């Protein structure tokens, strides 16, 4: 059944510093939240209790990916660091440089870094170390995201607003199985969240999202207007979730996306967190009964239940 509501917001933890990055690990069910100034990493079990906080000797932090329950990679400006032994006296080891984006894979084991030079690096867990393998990308990649089974890449120059390419596997090295030209207005959107039914392109602080819907083995792109700039977004199944700087978190289901016109899209459901600071990042855990995780500019970490529509 589709999602119909958001409920049960609760504060889970605080890092007391602006949260910049978030990532999920589907098994054993962990959420990572990364703060900057000071740099701290919180690893949160999906149930919300037993949070592990680690202080990192970095000057700043931007993105995080969990490769296992005990190994993470962190982007600090354009350097990527492996954090080894999160729960047992962690050690930092630089594994890549000149990176402008780090994409986490929910199933762990690997992550991808996008370089300023247009190349990419696969960061792969090998026993207790992280191996970095650079490779060449097809075209000029603007952003990418990695799901359990696919890699979603936004490529410049392939259409008015670029092109979305969906590749099988944990890197975009195999040829794409699906492509979608993007509208001109999507040209400035520099982040992507992928999924098997819906992929969304966005830019933090922008008031538009490009939704790419997959149906009958084809992709169709559509620009959605929001009623305020987005702080961050997440995708679950055919639904879009948006966090706004005013503290709102909104759900837009597949029907709302399909019916959207030129006016700002109306949310299926929305709630105000009441958190300290502005929402900065979103992450998702769970599949049958998903949970949304929100990090704020004040360092607070909140969870919300995503409610499915009842049958009958």
Image (cartoon, rainbow, N blue to C red):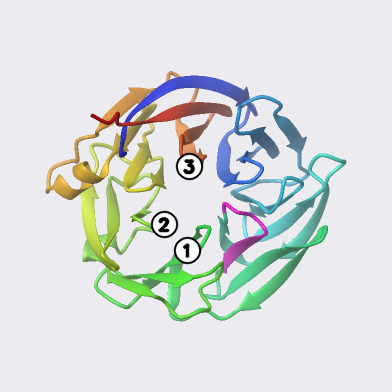
- Label 2: few (<14), some (14–19) or many (≥20) C-alpha neighbours in 10 Å: many
160 or 293: nearer the viewer: 293
Which residue lies at the image location 57% right of the left edge and 56% below the top edge? 105
Per the model, the C-alpha gap separating discs 1 and 2 is 6 Å
For marks 1 and 3 on the same chain, the one whose residue lies earlier in the sequence = 1
Q: Position of residue 170 (x, y in %)?
A: 56, 67
Per the model, the C-alpha gap separating discs 3 and 2 is 20 Å
Question: Which residue of the protein is positioned furthest toward the right in this rendering?
Answer: 89
Give the number of the mark in front: 1 or 3. Answer: 3
Task: Give the residue number, with chain letter if any, for mark 1.
Answer: 144
For marks 1 and 2 on the same chain, the one whose residue lies earlier in the sequence = 1
Task: Give the residue number, with chain letter if any, for mark 3.
Answer: 287
Which residue lies at the image location 24% right of the left edge and 61% below the top edge? 221
Quadrant where the N terminus sits is top left
Q: Which residues are magenta?
A: 106-114
User: Of helix, strand and loop, which one carries label 1?
Assistant: strand
User: Of helix, strand and loop, which one carries label 3?
Assistant: loop
115 relative position to 224: left or right: right
144 or 218: nearer the viewer: 218
Quadrant where the C terminus sits is top left
Residue 190 counted in the magenta span: no
Q: Quadrant of residue 223?
A: bottom left
Say the numbered circle drawn on residue 28. Answer: none
Per the model, the C-alpha gap separating discs 1 and 3 is 22 Å
Label 2 near label 1: C-beta < 8 Å? Answer: yes
Task: Give the residue number, with chain letter if any, for mark 2.
Answer: 192
């Amino acid at each position: 059944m589709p999602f119909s509501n958001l409920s049960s917001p609760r504060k889970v933890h605080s890092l007391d510093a602006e949260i910049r990055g978030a990532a999920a690990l589907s098994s054993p069910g962990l959420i990572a939240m990364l703060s900057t100034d000071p740099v701290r990493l919180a690893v949160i079990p999906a149930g919300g209790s037993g949070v592990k906080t680690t202080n990192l000797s970095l000057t700043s932090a931007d993105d995080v990916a969990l490769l296992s329950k005990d190994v993470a990679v962190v982007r600090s400006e354009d350097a990527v660091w492996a954090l080894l032994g999160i729960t047992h006296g962690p050690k930092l080891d630089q594994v890549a440089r000149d990176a402008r984006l780090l994409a986490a894979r929910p199933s762990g084991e690997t992550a991808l870094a996008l370089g300023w030079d247009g190349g990419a690096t696969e960061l792969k867990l090998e026993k207790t170390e992280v191996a970095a393998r650079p490779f060449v990308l097809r075209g000029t990649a603007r952003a990418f995201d990695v799901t359990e089974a696919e890699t979603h890449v936004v490529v410049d120059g392939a259409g008015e607003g670029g092109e979305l390419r969906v590749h099988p596997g944990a890197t975009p090295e195999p040829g794409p199985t699906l492509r979608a030209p993007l509208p001109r207005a999507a040209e400035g959107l520099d982040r992507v969240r992928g999924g098997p039914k819906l992929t969304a392109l966005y830019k933090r602080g922008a008031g538009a999202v490009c939704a790419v819907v997959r149906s009958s083995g084809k992709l169709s792109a559509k620009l959605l207007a929001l009623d305020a700039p987005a702080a961050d977004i997440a995708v679950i199944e055919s639904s879009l979730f948006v966090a706004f700087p005013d503290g709102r978190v909104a759900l837009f289901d597949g029907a709302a996306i399909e019916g959207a016109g030129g006016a700002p899209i109306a949310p299926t459901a929305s709630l105000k967190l009441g958190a300290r600071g502005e929402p900065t990042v979103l992450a998702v855990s769970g599949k049958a009964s998903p949970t949304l995780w929100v990090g704020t500019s004040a360092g607070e970490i909140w969870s919300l239940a995503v409610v499915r529509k009842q049958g009958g």
